[in-house]
Image (cartoon, rainbow, N blue to C red):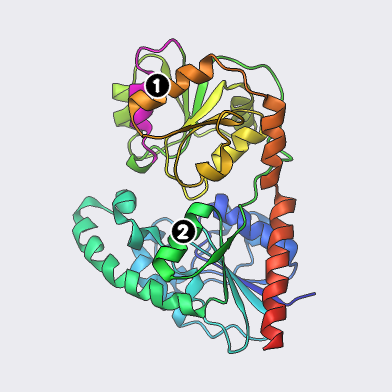
């Protein structure tokens, strides 16, 4: 059994990247888990033994971890170099790939995306208070240089989608193998009766473009159910047409019911991967997605959904009308989603880690 250390950005909320870490720990029981900040009350028991950095002691760290982003490089670089293991696996979307590793130990980076704060600040600026955005934008130029320099410490990059592999090539000049993140296909399964309702699941922020859907559904004879919270919810509700209903956050059982009953999920987002799209398909539900980012790996046009070329209300309205009048094979859609299972993720990651360790030992 390989001795493994796992490094992850922060553990303050349980979402897609944290599920990847949970699968990695299931693959490598007993592995050390390093992070910057951990909120144990929000984590499953399998992640609560993470070893945080000095940032854990900053008042309000778990509630406002984004404010500590300027200190994240320091938090990783001041830790002792990881030693006495066979391999380090980082789960990185900001700074975790900068984890220090002792000489001779290979480092596999599962990259959710090169740091969006630095490389695509316009899409992430809503995370920062408006008054701080001009300063933050200037600071990101330095972050880009630092982020690029830390790529040299990675032995093998793994991307969560082909779109992210292209970003890694652009940002770091490195090739990456693609391993899609794990989806709970054993939980998200088909069942129940279909309705004529459409569904959106995601944060209600400008980046997710929910406003495009409000305009697309205006005047249509179909309902759009919106699952999620965010800073723009109140403004969106004020201008939403009568056939759009906001449900806020829902638990997993309710979310599965919504996936199962939806005519289609509508997702106008250029996403790194987009686990919600894969969850919907695991329930047999077609996806109307933007022809960009992770959707191009998930949606097979006219088979498991439809890819829309332009993120405009008119283009998505046309796709909704197409979906309303078309019956795709729900069983085939659910079957195709099995390529995103947790077992498949663990198997592909084990193969890459084993190969990387073997190559390192042959040098």
Majority secondary structure in the magenta region: helix
Label whose residue precedes the other's in the sequence (2 or 1): 2
Circle 2 sits on which residue?
Answer: 166
In the image, the segment drawn in magenta is 208-221
- Residue under label 1: 317
Q: Residue furthest top?
A: 221
- Residue 236 numbered tag: none
Residue 254 visible within the image:
yes
Q: Residue at x 46, y 13 (%)?
A: 222
Callout 2: helix, strand or loop? helix
Q: Is residue 94 above or below residue 300?
A: below
Quick check: 50 above or below 131? below
330 displayed left or right of 117 = right
Q: Magenta stretch: residue 123 in it? A: no
Taking the spot 67% from the left edge, 24% from the top edge, the residue there is 329
Pick out the residue farthest to the right: 1
């Amino acid at each position: 059994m390989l001795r493994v250390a796992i490094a992850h950005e922060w553990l303050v909320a349980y979402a897609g990247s944290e599920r990847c870490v949970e699968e990695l720990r299931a693959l490598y029981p007993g592995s050390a888990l390093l992070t910057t900040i951990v909120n144990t009350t929000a984590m499953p028991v399998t992640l609560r033994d993470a070893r945080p950095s000095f940032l854990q002691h900053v008042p309000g760290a778990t509630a406002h971890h984004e404010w500590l982003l300027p200190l994240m490089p320091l938090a990783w670089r001041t830790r002792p170099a990881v030693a006495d293991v066979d391999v380090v696996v980082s789960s990185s979307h900001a700074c975790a790939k900068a984890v220090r590793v002792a000489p001779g130990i290979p480092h596999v980076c599962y990259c959710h995306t090169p740091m969006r704060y630095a490389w695509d600040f316009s899409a992430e600026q809503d995370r920062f208070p408006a008054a701080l955005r001009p300063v933050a934008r200037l600071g990101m130029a330095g972050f880009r240089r630092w982020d690029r320099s830390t790529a040299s410490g990675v032995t093998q990059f793994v991307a969560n989608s082909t779109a992210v592999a292209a970003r890694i090539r652009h940002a770091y000049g490195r090739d990456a193998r693609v391993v899609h993140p794990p989806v709970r296909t054993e939980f998200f399964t088909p069942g129940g009766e279909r309705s004529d309702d459409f569904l959106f699941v995601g944060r209600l922020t400008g980046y997710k473009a929910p406003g495009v859907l409000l305009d697309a559904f205006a005047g249509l004879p179909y309902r759009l159910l919106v699952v999620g919270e965010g800073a723009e919810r109140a403004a969106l509700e004020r201008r939403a047409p009568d056939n759009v209903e906001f449900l806020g956050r829902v638990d997993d059982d309710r979310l599965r019911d919504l996936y199962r009953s939806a005519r289609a999920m509508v997702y106008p987002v250029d996403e790194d991967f987009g686990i919600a799209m894969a969850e919907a398909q695991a329930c047999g539900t077609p996806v109307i997605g933007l022809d960009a980012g992770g959707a191009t790996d998930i949606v097979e046009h006219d088979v498991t959904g439809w890819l829309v070329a332009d993120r405009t209300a008119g283009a998505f309205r046309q796709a909704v009308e197409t979906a309303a009048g078309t019956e795709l094979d729900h069983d085939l859609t659910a079957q195709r989603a099995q390529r995103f299972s947790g077992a498949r993720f663990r198997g592909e990651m084990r193969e890459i880690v084993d190969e990387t360790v073997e190559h390192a030992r042959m040098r």
